Image: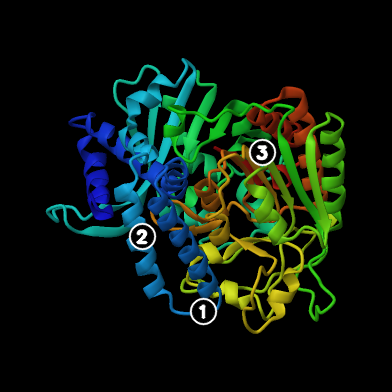
């Protein structure tokens, strides 16, 4: 069923559910199936091919990977890639058709809401958020309005059918968060408020319509959709100094279908950890320093290395000019935990927004040093790129040179884009921590989710991600991360360590300083 078909059915179901609640089953099943397939494609392909003994299949796969890398390179130079993409699509079709071990697709396609329900305990709910255009009344189910409706699909242990709850229109959320709002101190405080200055707008819009279905609920598993990917649910305020994280244990999922086959969040002493921080973005030939050195990232990874080494873990520690893109790609496939403390970037679709110059901000806390960068001349090869996975990335050693160049050269450039991440085999990786700015952001394409680092790392096979939704202050980020690893060694569970860290930071600071980071499975 094409995307329009799903939208037609969702809009129809929102009205018809009053007559037959059973229509919500189909909506829920379609939602988890679509989300699963969008994130599973590369990983399932890689699993199937690597586990086969078919030399032709493996060769076709290698050719496909080579093409995808070539496409990424041509994208970065602004070249036309239509012919290459056609070749890549043909090869992908061959791989799908000829791989008998392509089991991940079958598993994802067969998951239904009843299986998700089986994974719930008594005081738990699963929430799938969904957004779609509404039908024009009396249009014979063919024409849509310009309004995008957001709904919540809720199931509990006792549900006879999923509940489909209308929440709000997209323009209402845009009014609160700004369609292309900045991510600075004042902007975040205006949205989430402070401990002593409550703002309940998000609560009233998103959460209050669901309250009657959340009585006695302690744990909420939720999967965002559309603009809700930009929201830190833990920091939504119900009243002054009372946030959702105080009321519920909130677990973010790429799809609630994850409850059927959950990933293990347990941590053990045999894991291999790769740390990157204190990175030198310059070289001997650097003319302009676009990405500034982040002093806090060096002390952060040094402290984390000290914490992990005390437990005699296998820790790889890369700083200064040694934290290269080449090293990351070499180590990623064999690392259980990867921690990257650096600059991150996400640039909006150039067709939709004019990039504003970054502004330094003074606050009551003094000058805040952020893990994000200003624009330079060379950055426009990323900013203006039509591919959203090329407009999101992490900055590694020597990256200032590519930002200053007028054209692409051979070899790695120090900029690890989401496009490149998506084609690294990271099935072994339990956790990636992106201790950087805006790493949870990306282009939001209808109900397809976020096209950025989040999507790329999941496509690469990573089980858990910690990422940020706005510009993160250097000092408090170091505190958050070192607290997290200390608790991880004590609790030996990624999810528990993150929740305990978030609550400890929440007791000390306003949301701006702790709520940017989210953990997603």
Q: Residue at x 72, y 69 (%)?
A: 399
Query: Disc 3 vs disc 2: which is toward the camera?
Result: 2
Q: Quadrant of residue 105?
A: top left
Q: Residue at x 18, y 52 (%)?
A: 137
**Colour logic:** rainbow
Question: In the rendered view of the protein, which quadrant contains the C terminus?
Answer: top right
The residue labelled by disc 1 is 78
- The answer to whether residue 447 is visible is no
Q: CA distance from mark 3 to mark 2?
A: 31 Å
Badge 3: residue crowd in 10 Å (few <14, some 14–19, many ≥20): many
- The answer to whether residue 284 is visible is yes
Locate residue 305, reporting x and y percent: 84, 41
Element carrying mark 1:
loop
Query: Disc 1 vs disc 3: which is toward the camera?
Result: 3
The residue labelled by disc 2 is 91
Locate residue 89, reporting x and y percent: 35, 62
Q: Is residue 353 above or below residue 468?
A: below
Q: CA distance from mark 1 to mark 3?
A: 35 Å
Q: Is residue 237 above or below residue 370?
A: above
Q: Earlier in the sequence, mark 1 or mark 2?
A: 1
- Between residue 151 and residue 333, name the one nearer to us: 333
Mark 1 touches mark 2? (CB < 8 Å): no
The residue labelled by disc 3 is 336
- Between residue 4 and residue 78, name the one nearer to us: 78
Q: Is residue 430 left or right of residue 142?
A: right
Q: CA distance from mark 1 to mark 2?
A: 23 Å
Element carrying mark 2:
helix
């Amino acid at each position: 069923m094409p995307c329009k078909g799903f939208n037609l059915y969702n809009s129809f179901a929102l009205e018809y559910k009053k007559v037959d609640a059973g229509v919500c089953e189909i909506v829920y099943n379609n939602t988890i199936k679509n989300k699963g397939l969008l994130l599973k494609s590369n990983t399932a392909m890689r699993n199937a091919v690597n586990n086969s003994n078919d030399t032709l299949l493996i060769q076709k796969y290698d050719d496909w990977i080579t093409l995808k890398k070539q496409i990424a390179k041509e994208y970065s130079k602004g070249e036309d890639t239509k012919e290459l993409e056609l070749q890549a699509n043909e090869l992908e079709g061959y791989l799908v058709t000829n791989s008998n071990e392509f089991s991940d697709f079958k598993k994802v396609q067969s998951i239904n809401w009843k299986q998700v329900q089986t994974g719930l305990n008594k005081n738990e709910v699963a929430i799938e958020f969904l957004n779609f255009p509404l039908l024009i009344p009396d249009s014979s189910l063919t024409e849509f309005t310009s309004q995008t409706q957001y709904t919540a699909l809720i199931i509990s242990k006792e549900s006879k059918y999923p509940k489909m709850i209308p929440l709000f229109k997209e323009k209402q959320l845009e009014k609160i968060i700004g369609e292309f709002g900045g991510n600075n101190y004042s902007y975040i405080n205006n949205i989430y408020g402070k401990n002593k200055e409550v703002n309940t707008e998000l609560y009233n819009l998103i959460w209050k319509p669901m309250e009657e279905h959340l009585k006695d609920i302690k744990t909420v598993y939720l999967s965002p959709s559309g603009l809700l990917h930009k929201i830190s649910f833990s920091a939504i305020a119900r009243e002054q100094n009372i946030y959702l994280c105080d009321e519920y244990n909130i677990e973010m999922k790429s799809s609630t279908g994850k409850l059927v086959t959950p990933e293990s969040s347990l941590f053990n002493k045999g894991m291999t950890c790769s740390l990157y921080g204190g990175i030198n973005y310059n070289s001997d030939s650097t003319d302009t320093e676009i990405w500034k050195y982040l002093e806090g990232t060096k002390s952060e990874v040094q402290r984390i290395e000290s914490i992990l080494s005390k437990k005699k873990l296998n820790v790889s520690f890369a700083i200064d000019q040694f934290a290269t893109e080449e090293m990351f790609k070499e180590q990623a496939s064999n690392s259980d935990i990867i921690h990257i403390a650096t600059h991150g970037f996400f640039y909006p679709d150039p067709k939709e927004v004019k990039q504003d110059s970054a502004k330094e901000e003074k606050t009551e806390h003094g000058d805040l040093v952020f893990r994000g960068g200003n624009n330079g001349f060379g950055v426009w090869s990323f900013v203006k790129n039509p591919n959203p996975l090329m407009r999101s990335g992490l900055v590694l050693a020597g990256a200032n040179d590519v930002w200053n160049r007028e054209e692409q050269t051979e070899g790695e450039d120090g900029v690890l884009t989401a496009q490149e991440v998506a084609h690294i085999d990271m099935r072994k990786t339990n956790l990636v921590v992106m201790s950087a700015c805006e790493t949870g952001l990306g282009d939001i394409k209808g109900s397809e989710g976020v096209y950025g680092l989040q999507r790329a790392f999941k496509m690469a096979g990573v089980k858990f991600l910690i990422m940020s939704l706005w510009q993160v202050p250097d000092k408090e980020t170091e505190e958050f991360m070192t607290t997290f690893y200390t608790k991880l060694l004590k609790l030996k569970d990624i999810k528990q360590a993150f929740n305990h860290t978030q609550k400890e930071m929440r007791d000390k600071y306003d949301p701006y300083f702790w709520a940017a980071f989210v953990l997603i499975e």
